[in-house]
Image (cartoon, rainbow, N blue to C red):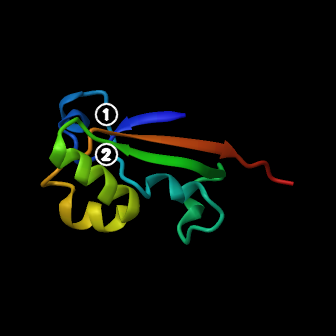
Amino acid sequence: MLTTPHFSSANSYTDPTHKHHLGWRSFEYFSDDHELSYYSAARFRITKRVLRFHGGLVNAVARRFAARWPDLYERRFAWMVPAWYMEIELAALKKH
């Protein structure tokens, strides 16, 4: 399981060790199905992805919205109600 700040989180930018700002689809590049999978020979299957938010009513609504429509959330609403971090679970795929 990987945990990383979502690109909309202030934590993604304030920590100087964070060199990349990642979003919902960032790890799809390591899938055989992705059109740009040639960036890396490593192959993974995403088994779980979750956007985590702070507490409160607005964040609870954003969490439910982002879980159902993650692309729309990132395109239109991520900067209004930032996600706190993402959890991504990957399964390594071996070449045969």
Q: Quadrant of residue 90?
A: top right
Residue 74 in the figure: left or right of residue 90: left
Q: Amino acid at mark 1?
A: His
Q: Considering the numbered disc 1 on the image, is that residue within a helix, a strand or a loop?
A: loop
Mark 1 surroundings within 10 Å by alpha-carbon count, few (fewer than 14), some (14 through 19), many (20 or more): few
**Quick check: 54 above or below 38?**
above
Q: Is residue 82 visible?
A: no
Res. 42 in view: yes
Question: Which quadrant, please, contains the N terminus?
Answer: top right
* Residue shown at the point (64%, 50%) measured from the top left: 44
Q: State left or right for residue 66 relative to residue 34.
A: left
Q: Is residue 73 above or below residue 21?
A: below
Residue 92 % position (x, y): 70, 44
What number of labels is visible? 2
Q: Secondary structure at mark 2?
A: loop
Q: Residues within 10 Å of mark 2 (few under 14, many from 20)?
A: some
Q: Can you identify the residue that label 2 sits on? A: 21
Task: Write down the quadrant of residue 31 in the picture.
Answer: bottom right
> Which quadrant of the figure has residue 3?
top left
The reply to whether dot 1 and dot 2 touch (C-beta < 8 Å) is yes
Per the model, the C-alpha gap separating discs 1 and 2 is: 7 Å
Classify 55 as above or below 96: above
Q: Amino acid at mark 2?
A: His
The residue closer to the viewer here, 92 or 76, is 76
Residue sitting at x 25%, y 37%: 12
Percent from the top left, x then y, of residue 4? 38, 36
Q: Quadrant of the C terminus?
A: bottom right
- Indicate which disc residue 18 carries: 1
Q: Is residue 90 left or right of residue 56?
A: right
